[in-house]
Image: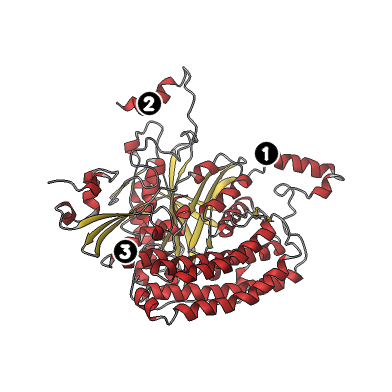
Amino acid sequence: MQPRDPVAAVREAFPGAVVEVVEFRGETTLVIQTDRIAEVATFLRDADGLKYNFLVDVTGVDYLPDYPRFGVLYHLYSMLTNRRLALKVRLGQEDDEDEALVVPSVTGVWPTANWQEREVFDMFGIRFAGHPDLRRILMPADWDGYPQRRDYPLGYETVQFSFNYDEIQKHKPFAKE
Amino acid sequence: MTVAPEMTRWEGTLEELKGLVSPRALSGETVLLNMGPQHPSTHGVLRLLLEMDGETLVSIVPDIGYLHTGIEKNMESKRYEQSIVMTDRMDYLAPFSNNLVYCLAIEKLTGLDVPERAQIIRVIMAELTRLNSHLVWLGTHAIDIGAMSLLLYCFRERERILDLFEMLSGQRMMGTYFRPGGVWRDVTDEFLPELEKYLAYLPGKIDEYEALLTRNPLWIDRTQGVGIVTPEDAIAWGLSGPVLRASGVNFDLRKAQPYSGYETYDFDIPMGLHGDTYDRYLVRMQEMRESIKIITQAKDRLKKATGPFRSQDRKFVPPPRAELGTSMEAVIHHFKLWTEGFKAPKGEVQVMVEGPRGIISCTLVGDGTNKPARVHFRTPSFIHIQAIPLLAKDHLLADLVAIIGTLDPVLGDCDR
């Protein structure tokens, strides 16, 4: 099996799906259009000369103050060609509601993505369309907010001043009733 | 329909529960049983919701998060070098593998060099960590299945590894010994003779364990054919380390994507045939012998390798104390590093190492400041606990205990 260049192969098979190619420290990251990630992933897993059969890692990143705000990173590894590749999707415009943050799930491509996508949902509030069991995984089921977001306070309770009164009030547990 | 008391303690909704167990559980035909989070055989605070038909497992729902400490969130508020101490606390049985992956990620992001001597010390410590972790695995796995004495033997041998850790890092368990660009300090005078004594002592002890277990009919009955994983399943579910290799997949990052100079050592990758609990036992036992081989070679090299044990790049590594009295530049570097640390460029890197349990991967996102924008650890325990339903389905409840033991999860590693 002759290894193929993943960038050219994806560009050929999915015209317009590759938004950007980032080269950094010897790593190649393909930024893919958000709604096409599942089909690109299936292609990378199955196509001859690519065979990225092992999904190492799925993780979210919050790029605040940049927009699109969130990124979901997929690190792939091919045991047959011994090569690595990273995929990335970007989503979340400034006025997006939480419900609008939707990425197609790759659980059908690699079953190992199941819990990793649940963790991204738990920590960033990114929904995965087609995920069989999208519940919180590390935080309690009734937790409010998404802890890994950059605007989520670290541990301590934020002091309530007049300028942020409403925002803090929203997060108080008693305010739900 | 009355709802069983087990269900009312389920923290999600009844609708969610319906998607996780079979419809028979809701009519009372099968029984829902709660195992953990406080259970001696779950190796920490792992909770499993079991659906039982008699003594047979129908469905298993792992529930994790009891040990979630927000390490990744915490790291975003600390400087790069301040967070090394937290990586130890993730997988507390393999602290140096976690140190290593985090330091390698920083080095890749900043382009920092690591001198040869530091690489060798790192290999020695990483392999000692593997021995340490496998000894604890063997002891706890055996006591789960019913071989009581092994736990005591394994902890006796492990204690001497902890002594070796203490000689270098000052701590028995949470060493925090690795630093970006090398290690914290050079090996001490008493370390190498003690290490040599230990390397001569351990192989005989591993023979003793094998004499107790490998041909023991009780051990074979409890482990052979239990929790079989096919190679295809193992790859699709992201299993790695000894679990993957026991299924017959020849994949070890130390060979496939070498780091820290592993390509220069002579060692073999033990593999299994059947992917069952017994093969995973054999693979881990053989891995311990291979680790001893690697440490023996590294120790000989360490005697010849002169040179610094840490990078000399003063933008990242503080100068030694002696330089501070004579060099103004050293004082400036010292001050800068201890007040604001070093800055890493904007970019994203990912590094993988072969830990004792499997692939540990660290994703590090730098934003040009002295703190990371995002750190994420892909930990093998997290992935392996996800696969418990795959391994344990249709087994007996007693086999579940063997299956948890053979996956060797550490819940601190899983929940981070």
CA distance for labels 1 and 2: 35 Å
Identify the secondary structure beneath mark 3.
helix
At label 3, the amino acid type is: Leu
At label 1, the amino acid type is: Glu
Which residue is under mark 3? Answer: B390
Which of these two is toward me, B222 or B411?
Answer: B222
Identify the secondary structure beneath mark 1.
loop
Image height of B159 relative to A149, above or below: below
Where residue B271 appears, as percent x and y from the top left, is: 46, 76
Mark 3 falls within which chain? Answer: B
Number of the front mark, 3 or 1:
3
Instruction: Check if mark 1 and mark 2 are on a common chain.
Output: no
Where residue B332 appears, as percent x and y from the top left, is: 78, 40
Q: Residues within 10 Å of mark 1 (few under 14, many from 20)?
A: few
CA distance for labels 3 and 1: 48 Å
The residue at the point 60 percent across, 49 percent down is B85
Which of these two is toward me, B234 or B199?
Answer: B199
* Label pair 3/1, CB-CB below 8 angstroms: no
Where residue A74 appears, as percent x and y from the top left, is: 43, 53
The residue at the point 45 percent across, 21 percent down is A164
The residue at the point 43 percent across, 77 percent down is B272
Which of these two is toward me, B94 or B147?
Answer: B147
Which residue is under mark 1? Answer: B340
Q: Residues within 10 Å of mark 3 (few under 14, many from 20)?
A: some
At label 2, the amino acid type is: Lys
Which residue is under mark 2? Answer: A170
Dividing the picture into quadrants, the one containing residue B367 is top right
| Residue B339 in view (yes/no) | yes
